[in-house]
Amino acid sequence: MKTKTIILFLLGLFLLSPVYAFCEDGEQGSIEIVSITDNLEDNFKKWEWGEGQEIELTVKVENNLNTSQDFTTEIMFLDGDDTIYLVVDNTDLIETVRVSGENDKEIKFSFEIEDDIRLSNYDMVVKTYVTQNESNYCSQEEVVIKTNGFDYCEDDGNLTIQSITDSENWSWMFDEEQSIDVEIKSELSSDDYDIELIFYDSDSKEYNVAEDSDNLIETVTFANKTVVVNFEFTPRLEMEDGNYGLYVKVTSNRACAEKRIYENYKKGTSTLKDYDIISIKDEPGIIIKDAIGPNSFVAGKEITYRIELRNTGENEPQVEVWIYNLQYNIKAQNVIYNFKKDTTRFAEVSFVPSGTPGLLSLYFYAQYGYNNDSGHFTEETTDNHKIRKRVTLLTPEVKVVTPITEVTPAPVTKQQPIPQESKSIIPTAIAIVIILMSIIIGLVIYKKLRKDKVVQQNPYS
């Protein structure tokens, strides 16, 4: 029994342990790695690196002690259980900074990826510890990275993308044609150049933005000059609204160039780049995204729908959410207050249906743009963003009640006791007499037979 307990205990420790213990005594103490960020300095996709690229990471550490401490942060790379060397200078993988008590700090790492590395996935393990006290205070995190997984460019200077511009300041609407100009400079002789627009989401995953992806690729032929290539396309209605990034790549048989759009922004004392600057949203207003509720219901009973709304317009102090059907006289509403732009809210609306059973349509929409002076709403969800739901009104169940018939009890008649027939003792006496007489007769016969036998045995006595 003790052996089994020890085995289970050791197994539990194994399952709870990290894949690789970079901290010399495991994670200890009240310090923490809050986040690890790939700043996309020279690489297009997060955690996808190519040979020769300059990589920049930000590691945010947190000191939960009440005194300032020196924090040492280190990075290592693993191929399975083996340490590998992916960077040109390994001294770039260790930094020591002072972190105030009960505070956090961002630590920057910049390093160059080695040449001639193979396509593979590796574990990047990061640890931070109180300098010269790792055994008591240490925290670690892991990130999986991919090397040479993306067909990146190595610019040689003879072909460059000078600029990427649009006419809407990177704020687009669904189902509205957009236009992007890519300015390309080549110092080479005549060649065919393929220019491709690649969009990606906030997770740096390639995302299909255009209704027709063929509109995102153009081929031009030119030599030793600067040209502007125009792209026109329409964002597809089915995509999610949000922020996206754009990567542009130009290739020929002899050269390659790439560029991403970005904006600089301040974060504390640092200047970072925002690569997801394209805002794509639906037409401004209150949009009904979904209406969750029954597909059939019974007249006379209250039902409730949970309605999902999206505000793609401006901040709204109040919004009325409606369920409507004129034929069945259904007009039910609820109010949402302080509906912020670019947010999603839910509202529950209830009503009691009545009318002739059968199929009917429920319409879900919102009224907004409240005018304080008039006390009325000035805007309503457009028809293409209302929801129409086909439902069935059922006949109420009719309970069949069986009447209880009152039964008059019959008069009680007092019954006279039935005289029981007295049992005669004569048959019993006769039986006893017969039995006794049989016994006596038997004894007499027995004695007679016995006496005759004795006489026969002694004839001369």
Image (cartoon, helix red, strand yellow):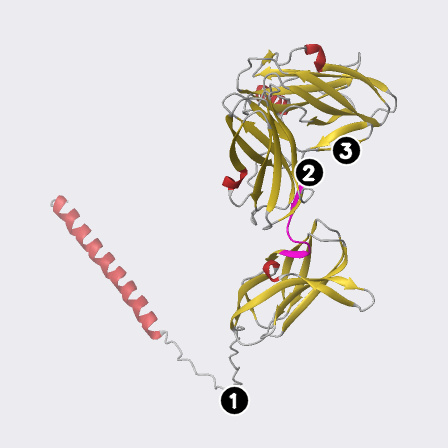
Q: CA distance from mark 3 to mark 1?
A: 103 Å
Q: Residues within 10 Å of mark 3 (few under 14, many from 20)?
A: few
Which contiguous range is marked in magenta? 277-288
In which quadrant of the rendered view does residue 182 lie?
A: top right
- Residue type at mark 2: give it: Ile
User: Is residue 334 something that shows in the picture?
Assistant: yes
Q: Is residue 380 above or below residue 402?
A: above
Q: CA distance from mark 2 to mark 1?
A: 98 Å
The quarter in which the N terminus is drawn is top right
392 part of magenta stretch: no
Residue 277 is marked as 2
- Residue type at mark 1: give it: Pro
First-in-chain label (2 vs 1): 2
- Residue at mark 3: 265
256 or 333: nearer the eye?
A: 256
First-in-chain label (2 vs 3): 3
Classify mark 1: helix, strand or loop.
loop
Rendering coords of residue 338 (x, y %): 78, 55
Classify mark 3: helix, strand or loop.
strand
Residue 411 is marked as 1
- Residue type at mark 3: give it: Tyr
Q: Residues within 10 Å of mark 2 (few under 14, many from 20)?
A: some
Residue at image location 13% in from the left, 44% down from the top: 457
In which quadrant of the rendered view does residue 268 lie?
A: top right
Query: In this rendering, would 220 be left or right of 127?
Result: left
Residue at image location 76% in from the left, 15% down from the top: 95
